[in-house]
Image (cartoon, rainbow, N blue to C red):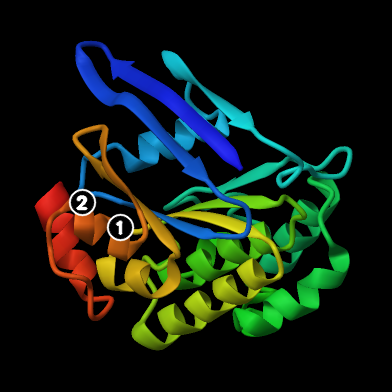
Amino acid sequence: MLEVRHITKRYGHVLALNDVSFDVRAGEVLGLIGPNGAGKTTLFECLAGVLHRDAGTVATIGDAFASPAGVPSMFYVPDAAAPWPVETVRWMLDYIVGFFGGDADAIAGVVRDLDLAPLLDVRIGALSKGQRKRALVGAGLVTRSPLLMIDEPFDGLDLRQSRSLAAVLRAHASRGRTFFLSVHQIGHAARVCDRFVLLGAGSVRGEGTLTELSAAARLPSPGSPADLEEVFLALT
């Protein structure tokens, strides 16, 4: 388990994150849901160490997130990133494996599952938005970090690609990997996530399964994933 407690972040007089606390459970797919400007990316960057947090702690409990020597316990895949634009996707996957102590044997499966074969010799800077997203998610999957944080994994993907990616993430989670996803599309989040953290105006408005959040919002027990939209609107 990862315990996030009392994370606070300010930009001058703007309070971007206000006393944010929640847990990440081993082997789950946790979704971070919130409207634009809620602080989702800021939270991810604070957890990943990209941004300095003004207050709060992040602690691992037990050995669920233990990783081999030289392998980071957490790997962050940011949104809208285009690293090494003159290098190819093949080069990026090899580099990630070498630099972060990844699994070279996993590359072939990730390439197959994410349909990256046609992109392997394409420069990263020449990829479309959706192609780059699949390549970056692939870079995260070839690491051996037990926790992957992915900002907007479905952004730029069509319906078929989104469903395929959701299945890939669920398959990796079933083998013990943990995912923390910032998801703007509520329908995608409802299909792939086990639990949710609802973020509004920099504060946690709810945490739990869809059923637990429905109860917190005093709504009927959910009958379908689409009910997450009603919970989201009620709590944020």
Q: Amino acid at mark 2?
A: Ala
Q: Which mark is residue 212?
A: 1
| Callout 2: SS | helix
Please say if the residues under marks 1 and 2 sit with CB atoms less than 8 Å apart.
Answer: yes
Which residue lies under the disc numbered 2?
A: 216
Element under label 1? helix
- Report x, y in % for residue 210: 31, 64
Foreground of the two, 193 or 16: 193
Does residue 190 lie above or below 93 as drawn? below
Residue 127 drawn at (x, y percent): 50, 68
Q: Position of residue 50 (x, y in %)?
A: 52, 29
Q: Residue at x 46, y 26 (%)?
A: 5
| Mark 1–mark 2 distance (CA, rounded to whole Å) | 6 Å
Residue 230 drawn at (x, y percent): 13, 64
Q: Visible in this render: residue 89?
A: yes
Quarter of the picture containing the N terminus is top right
